[in-house]
Amino acid sequence: MAEISKNARVGVVTEKFYCTCGGEVKMKTVFRGGKLRNLAQCSQCDRIERKPGDFR
């Protein structure tokens, strides 16, 4: 049998990130300066970073 591709696997795990203030970090896509940018924003303190790992 053929193997299933890595993109077709159903075992998807979503990782939740939390800010130091205790709020949950959510990803947002913003059109800024003629480009689409992905930003991470804390839901409690409204802090914005480039990626969720920067909240540590």
Image (cartoon, rainbow, N blue to C red):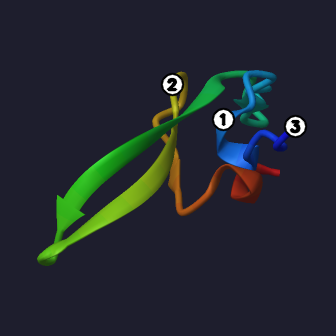
53 on left or right of 7:
right
Secondary structure beneath label 1: helix
Q: Which of the two discs, 3 and 2, labels the residue nearer the N terminus?
A: 3
Residue 39, numbered label: none
Alpha carbon separation for disc pair 3 and 2: 46 Å
**What residue is shown with label 1?**
8
**What residue is shown with label 2?**
43
Residue extending furthest toward the left: 34
Residue 7: x and y in percent read 66, 44
10 on left or right of 48:
right
50 on left or right of 39:
right
Residue 42: x and y in percent read 55, 34
Residue drawn at x 26%, y 53% as measured from the top left: 30
In the rendered structure, which amino acid carries the disc numbered 2? Ser
| Label 3 crowd (10 A; few <14 / some 14-19 / many >=20) | few
Q: Are marks 2 and 1 in contact (CB under 8 Å)?
A: no
**What residue is shown with label 3?**
1
Q: Which of the two discs, 1 and 3, labels the residue nearer the N terminus?
A: 3
